């Protein structure tokens, strides 16, 4: 069956789909015309695959759903593989296809064109995803949930499931785990658009697509969301997004951050919110909005963070259903706004008003095990699933790792973060350490850098090599990279606070300008920035007993070898996992059961190496040379 779904009530178009056989280029044509009450499909043609002719015979049935969608069910003796489909002047294919022996289910929505792609599903998935979003959806609907075989316990009963969602900068990931054991049952993902400002509606669409890619949430009793921190989601009185959200990595508000510190003083901000405002913080983005887009500022009634917005939508609110009393957040994400105090557990609305010029509605802050509510029904999401308070991404990762006192986590993702779980709130008027809260009721002092795994990607571009080859080259060089030192501030930096800085290579000579030395210098420079963060955390009285290395960059073999040499400490690498989504799943289980789950982390790898002081000495000399 091929289910083609279009939105009723549109002007009656005629849409031509050309289906091209990948190997031979032989094509046939399916002409589709639709209106609010009538769907007509005409198809005929032969297909040629592996040099054998075969014909697809099909019948079509259409129905108008109560929710206004027209669904066409096409039954065929044989079906087309997704890689054989290429659009020509047609709406973009989106969402999921569910394979059975002779069945594909696809959806079409009336929006922009886009080339079809295919992504292999992960273990345990019953879905594959094709298509790339090419225009913003004007609805929340994608494809009705595709049936899957329900998970069962050993005695044959239905398995209670928990879902964790990570809405990160790059993508949305969904993990579905067994409530009792934490075992991964299935997972899915969908990409986010690149950029430093993004329409939150695209996050919502990606969340629903990732849910479908994970096989839907049937059987899930509770879920929660971990999300990228600081993003500024401005909502008008109707619950509509006022403008694309400015993300944590958008540095246009750097001068606004300087102004706010100058106006009130560093100590007032550090004592009031636990942190010194920098360009990534929500409060600086509100000041920028006030000064540069006054009309958008005037239209803003409520301000939320990315995970707040997505939970609000899952609860059934949004455009046209703007109940701002249902807008909630958690203490970890609230602590990254610049106007909530981890020490007192309360908003500092005076700081918000000072920055923005007036008060706006802000989300209610929930406790670690408080429920936000229950889901409304969406494609792939049944109504009635318990929803947790959510968390900022770093707090979510700490929860997913089960990090406790004495643990320091070094995360190498798009950005780099160093954070620890502590009993007492931390504040730092220098701005090096952000005094955040965690997702368990404790605190999460954190140092963040803008440049982490992207430095490894830049090394690959510079050397014309993939990630594995960059690692091989770096491991051919000796500590100190023959005298080369990289300051990895490729697109400005947050710690140190250098929003306009650029990367630089120091000590380059004819003798040391080799690919291995350059590759190693890139790895060493990235790790030195994180080592400075580790020192800053320790300087606030945090005991460092174990260093946990996570994130995509942590899987690089050179990073694993060089990290203990730079940090001067043994490094523990947990098994690869989606720790932010895992933390959200742990939180959901906690909310459901009333206590944190006793899930195990899995087998870890301990990395030992002697400290190599030359690496950090060269890095420090390069910083001094530029006055950093």
Image: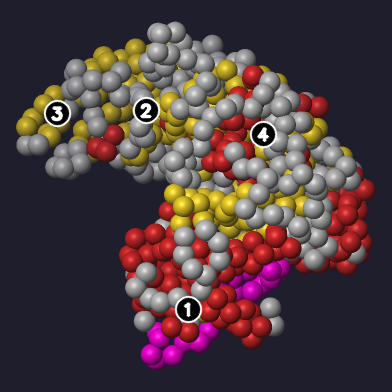
Cα–Cα span, label 3 and label 4: 52 Å
Q: Quadrant for residue 301, please give it.
A: top right
Residue tagged 2: 124
Mark 2, Cα crowd under 10 Å, few <14 / some 14-19 / many 20+, is: few
- SS class of the residue under badge 4? loop
Per the image, the residue denoted by label 4 is: 390
Residue 380 or 237: which is nearer the viewer? 380
Q: Quadrant of the N terminus?
A: top left
Display coloring: secondary structure
Label 3 belongs to which residue?
Answer: 46
Mark 1 residue crowding within 10 angstroms, few (<14) / some (14–19) / many (20+)? many
Q: Are marks 2 and 4 in contact (CB under 8 Å)?
A: no
Mark linked to residue 480? 1
Dot 3 or dot 1: first in sequence order is 3
**On the rendered structure, is 467 left or right of 410?**
left
Is residue 183 among what the camera can see?
Answer: yes
Question: How far across and down, in percent of the image, does residue 567 sit?
Answer: 56, 65
Residue 15 visible at all: no
Residue at 74%, 63% (x, y): give it: 539
Q: Is residue 504 magenta?
A: yes
Q: Earlier in the sequence, mark 3 or mark 4?
A: 3
């Amino acid at each position: 069956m091929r289910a083609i779904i279009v939105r009723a009530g549109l002007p009656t178009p005629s849409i031509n789909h050309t289906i091209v056989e990948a190997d031979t280029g032989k094509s046939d044509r399916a002409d589709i015309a639709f209106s609010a009450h009538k769907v007509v499909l005409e198809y005929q043609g032969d297909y040629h695959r592996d040099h054998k002719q075969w014909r697809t015979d099909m019948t079509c049935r259409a129905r108008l759903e109560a929710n206004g969608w027209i669904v066409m069910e096409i039954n065929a003796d044989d079906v087309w593989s997704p890689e054989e489909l290429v659009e020509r002047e047609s709406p973009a294919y989106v969402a999921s296809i569910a394979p059975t022996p002779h069945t594909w289910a696809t959806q079409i929505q009336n929006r922009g064109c886009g080339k079809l792609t295919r992504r292999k599903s992960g273990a345990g998935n019953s879905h594959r995803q094709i298509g790339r979003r090419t225009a913003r959806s004007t609805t929340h609907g994608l494809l009705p949930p595709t049936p899957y075989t329900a998970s069962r316990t050993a005695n044959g009963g239905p398995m209670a499931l928990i879902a964790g969602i990570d809405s990160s900068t790059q993508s949305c990931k969904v993990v579905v785990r067994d409530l009792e054991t934490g075992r991964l049952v299935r997972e899915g993902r969908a990409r986010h658009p690149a950029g430093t400002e993004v329409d939150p509606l695209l996050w919502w669409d990606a969340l629903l697509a990732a849910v479908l890619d994970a096989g839907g949430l049937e059987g899930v009793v509770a879920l929660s969301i971990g999300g990228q921190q600081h993003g500024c989601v401005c909502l008008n009185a109707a619950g509509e997004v006022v403008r694309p959200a400015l993300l944590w990595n958008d540095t246009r508000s750097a001068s606004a951050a300087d102004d706010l510190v100058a106006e009130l003083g560093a100590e007032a901000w550090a004592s009031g919110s636990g942190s010194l405002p920098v360009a990534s913080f929500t409060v600086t983005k509100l000041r920028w909005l006030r000064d540069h887009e006054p009309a958008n500022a005037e239209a803003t009634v409520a301000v939320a963070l990315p995970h707040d917005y997505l939970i609000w939508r899952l609860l059934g609110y949004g455009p046209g259903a703007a109940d701002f009393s249902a807008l909630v957040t958690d203490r970890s994400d609230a602590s990254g706004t610049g106007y909530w105090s981890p020490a007192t557990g309360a908003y500092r609305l005076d700081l918000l008003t000072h920055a923005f010029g007036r008060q706006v509605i802000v989300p209610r802050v929930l406790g670690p095990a408080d429920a936000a509510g229950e889901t409304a029904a969406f494609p792939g999401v049944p109504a009635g699933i318990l929803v947790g308070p959510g968390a900022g991404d770093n707090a979510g990762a700490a929860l997913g790792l089960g990090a406790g006192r004495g643990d320091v986590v070094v995360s190498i993702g798009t950005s780099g973060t160093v954070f620890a779980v502590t009993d007492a709130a931390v504040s730092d008027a220098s701005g090096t350490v952000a005094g955040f809260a965690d997702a368990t009721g404790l605190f999460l002092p954190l140092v963040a850098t803008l440049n982490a795994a992207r430095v490894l990607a830049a090394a690959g571009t510079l050397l014309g090599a993939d990630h594995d080859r960059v690692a091989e080259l770096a491991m051919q060089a000796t500590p100190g990279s023959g005298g080369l030192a990289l300051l990895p501030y490729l697109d400005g930096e947050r710690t140190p606070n250098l929003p306009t800085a650029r990367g630089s290579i120091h000590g380059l000579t004819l003798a040391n300008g080799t690919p291995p030395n350059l590759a190693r210098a890139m790895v060493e420079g990235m790790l030195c920035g994180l080592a400075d963060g580790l020192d800053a955390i320790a300087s606030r009285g945090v005991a460092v007993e174990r260093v946990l290395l996570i994130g995509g960059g942590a899987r690089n073999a050179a990073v694993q070898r060089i990290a203990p040499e730079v940090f001067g400490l043994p490094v523990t690498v947990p098994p690869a996992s989606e720790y932010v989504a895992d933390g959200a799943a742990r939180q959901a289980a906690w909310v459901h059961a009333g206590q944190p789950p006793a899930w195990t982390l899995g087998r870890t790898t301990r990395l030992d190496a002697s400290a190599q002081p030359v690496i950090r000495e060269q890095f420090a000399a390069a910083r001094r040379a530029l006055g950093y």
